[in-house]
Image: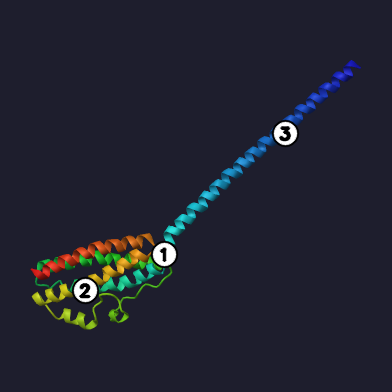
Amino acid sequence: MIRTRSLVRRTATVAAAGAAALVLAACGGDGDSAGSAGHNGHDTTATATASGSASASRGGHNAADVAFAQGMIPHHRQAVEMAALADGRAGSAEVRKLAAGIEKAQGPEIGTLSGWLTSWGEEAPAAGGMDHSAHGMDGMMTDKEMTELKNTSGTAFDAAFLKMMIKHHEGAVEMAKTERADGAYGPATKLAGRIVTAQSAEIDRMDQLRKD
């Protein structure tokens, strides 16, 4: 009888220990599983947030950004065309130096602006000899004015070039100010800020050259 009770107690103890082990294992499994799920869930959320932020930084543009890029491309192209005319026509070394600086700065910006439009799924203006001023774009020269500039040289070229380029730069500065006020795409508004600074300084320089 005593042996029977002892056997019963030992059996109960073993069963209890086994049950406890199962409970601990289950808890441990649940904890690992929950921790893994929580860890994975956290990573997924963080990844989604980072991805969303990256997407916003890449594509967070608006209509003002598109208008700025589409307008500034032909504007820059004409400035580069005007600047290229100085080589062999300008009478002043200062005018030739100024023109070379304009060509060097604005040429690469055309590529940048075109790249943005492509990435946004927008059409970049095609290169061509059309009269862009007919579209009301600020500071653009007419075909007639461009022809007159091509047909001058020496001091006459310098005077015409400075007068036209000041007007051209003033138009670009206004376009850039509009982008800074209304644009949403960070790189575009930053470029607009650089245009305002650089071309305002060049306007001052050209005004001085006209007085000299």
User: In the picture provided, is 3 more to the left or to the right than 124?
Assistant: right
105 vs 46: above or below: below
Quarter of the figure that contains the N terminus: top right
Image vertical order of residue 144 relative to residue 56, above or below: below
Which residue bears the numbered disc 3? 23
Quick one: label 3 or label 1, which is nearer the N terminus? Answer: 3
Compared across the picture, whether 154 is left or right of 41 comes to left
Q: Secondary structure at mark 3?
A: helix
Q: CA distance from mark 3 to mark 1?
A: 56 Å
Name the one closer to the observer, 170 or 141. 170
Q: Which mark is residue 61?
A: 1
The percent coordinates of residue 150 (x first, y second) are 17, 79
Among all residues in the image, which is located at the extreme front? 181
Report which quarter residue 169 is drawn in: bottom left
Q: Residue at x 54, y 47 (%)?
A: 43
Image location (x, y in percent) of residue 13: 79, 24
- Residue 167 circle label: 2
Query: Please, what is the three-letter code of the amino acid marked with disc 1?
Result: His
Badge 1 local density, few (<14 within 10 Å), some, or many (20+)?
some
SS of the residue under disc 1: loop
Question: Disc 2 or disc 3, which is closer to the eye?
Answer: 2
Q: Where the C terminus falls, by quadrant?
A: bottom left
Q: Mark 1 against mark 2, which lies toward the viewer?
A: 2
Using the image as rendered, state which of residue 31 and residue 61 is in the foreground.
Answer: 61
Q: Residue at x 37, y 60 (%)?
A: 186
- Residue sitting at x 57%, y 46%: 40
For marks 1 and 2 on the same chain, the one whose residue lies earlier in the sequence: 1
Q: Mark 1 to mark 2: distance in Å?
A: 29 Å
Between disc 3 and disc 1, the foreground one is: 1
Q: Amino acid at mark 2?
A: Lys
